[in-house]
């Protein structure tokens, strides 16, 4: 989904994600959400982005100058990242993750078959972002501050928002995007499974 900025809370269904080639053409990405800054809306004019990469073969990663990124293994037997500075890091099941600078030249090597990988990217001079992997057992309460945006990506299981909002249910692969507006907002998620929690904060807030 492509937005100037999230103006309200909503749920994005996995079936609606836009599938496209990588920036370097070496793989496929299902784009969940891309939030733009001000000015012309071109392919590089975004503040932060959520997507899922499909890696079917060893391939170089695209470079993103000025961007921080965090990669989470969603499925598959693992991915090895080889950086041009000599560092090597393996993402192993079930959901290893790695944060690194978009300028770093990286090459992805599959350990044993294809993988799917959740990708959070953000312009470091405009926003900051945090990502957590959490179990969902019963009720989870999220407090969203004005100016912040939270995203909840359902890794496993099923849940519903029991906070009086119209967000309803989310299933595996769906992503809820939560905005506060002008006042702090309380969201209650009830269910069972696992989630990725993402918080995006304007730089300087």
Image (tube, rainbow, N blue to C red):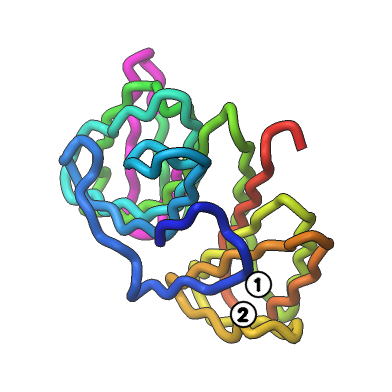
Q: Position of residue 67 (x, y in %)?
A: 47, 30
Q: x%, y% of residue 111?
A: 27, 44
The magenta segment is: 71-88
Instruction: Tell me if 127 is positioned left or right of 24 in this view.
Output: right
What secondary structure is found at the residue carrying circle 1? Answer: strand
Residue 116 is situated, as x and y percent measured from the top left of the image, at: 32, 56
Compared to residue 33, the image places residue 84 above or below, namely above
**Label disc, if present, on residue 192 of the rendered structure:** 2
Name the image quarter holding the C terminus: top right
Q: Quadrant of residue 172?
A: bottom left
Quarter of image, res 166:
bottom right
In the rendered image, the quadrant that contains the N terminus is bottom left
Q: Which residue is found at the position 56% from the left and 30% from the top?
A: 124
- Determine which residue is flagged by label 1: 136
Say whether residue 16 is magenta. Answer: no
Q: CA distance from mark 2 to mark 1?
A: 5 Å
Most frequent secondary structure within the magenta stretch: strand
């Amino acid at each position: 989904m492509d937005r100037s900025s999230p103006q309200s809370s909503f749920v994005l269904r996995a079936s609606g994600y836009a599938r496209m080639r990588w920036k370097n053409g070496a793989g496929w990405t299902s784009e969940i959400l891309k939030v733009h800054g001000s000015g012309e809306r071109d392919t590089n004019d975004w503040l932060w982005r959520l997507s899922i990469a499909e890696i079917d073969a060893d391939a170089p990663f695209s470079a993103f100058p000025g961007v921080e990124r965090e990669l989470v293994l969603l499925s598959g037997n693992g991915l090895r990242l080889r950086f041009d500075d000599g560092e090597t890091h393996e993402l192993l099941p079930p959901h290893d993750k790695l944060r690194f600078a978009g300028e770093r030249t990286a090459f992805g090597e599959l350990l044993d078959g294809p993988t799917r990988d959740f990708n959070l990217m953000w312009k470091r001079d405009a926003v900051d972002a945090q990502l957590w992997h959490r179990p969902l057992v019963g009720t989870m309460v999220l407090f969203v501050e004005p100016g912040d945006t939270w995203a909840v990506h359902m890794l496993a299981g099923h849940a519903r928002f029991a906070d009086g909002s119209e967000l309803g249910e989310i299933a595996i692969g769906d992503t809820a995007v939560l905005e506060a507006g002008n006042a702090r907002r309380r969201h209650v998620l009830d269910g069972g499974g696992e989630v990725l929690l993402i918080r995006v904060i304007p730089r300087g807030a």
